[in-house]
Image (spheres, rainbow, N blue to C red):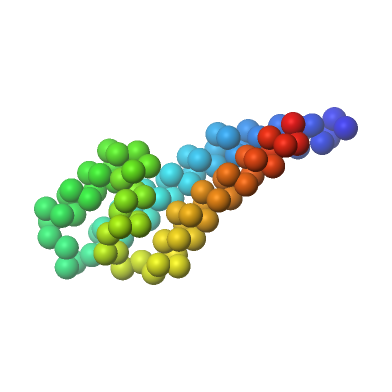
Amino acid sequence: MALLEQAVTALTSFYTSTYPVVLYGTWVVLSLWDLMRREEMTERDRLLWGGAVMFLPLVGPLSYLLLSDTRLSWNLRMLVTAGGAVVYVAATTAIALLT
């Protein structure tokens, strides 16, 4: 039983503290990487989107990934944004039910 409790504690720690930071970091890095690749975008628009991504937590990168005319495929954007959030909610729900 002690081994199961340790595993649940480790999973709880990962999914409540580490996973959200990694997920948010992935959204920011992917957004900024795509912004740097977009040559058709004006410098002003790049600065505005970059500022939004950097200084509006969650809203900035999610808005860029979901609403902008990015070069990234729709499937990739959905996998990273919605998929990451679904995994987080499912894991934390499962952990809550186990404890």
Residue 3: image quadrant is top right
The quadrant in which residue 35 appears is bottom left
Residue 42 lies in what quarter of the image?
bottom left
Residue 85, percent from left and from top: 51, 49
The number of numbered discs placed on residues in the rendered structure image is 0
Q: Residue at x 42, y 45 (%)?
A: 25
Left or right side of 40 for 53: right
Q: Is residue 29 visible?
A: no
Query: How far across and how far down the image is residue 92, in percent?
Result: 63, 40
Left or right of residue 48, residue 7 in this image: right
The answer, for residue 88, to whether it is visible in the render is yes
Give the quadrant of the N terminus.
top right
Q: Residue at x 45, y 61 (%)?
A: 78
Residue extending farthest right: 1
Q: Is residue 95 above or below residue 41?
A: above
Q: Is residue 91 left or right of residue 71?
A: right
- Most foreground residue, 73 or 94: 94
Q: Position of residue 55 (x, y in %)?
A: 27, 38
Q: Where 23 falls versus 75 (above or below)?
A: above
Q: What residue is at 52 percent from the left and 56 percent from the top?
A: 83
Residue at x-position 40% and y-position 67%: 74
| Lateral position of residue 53 relative to residue 14, left or right | left
- Rendered location of residue 99, percent (x, y): 74, 31
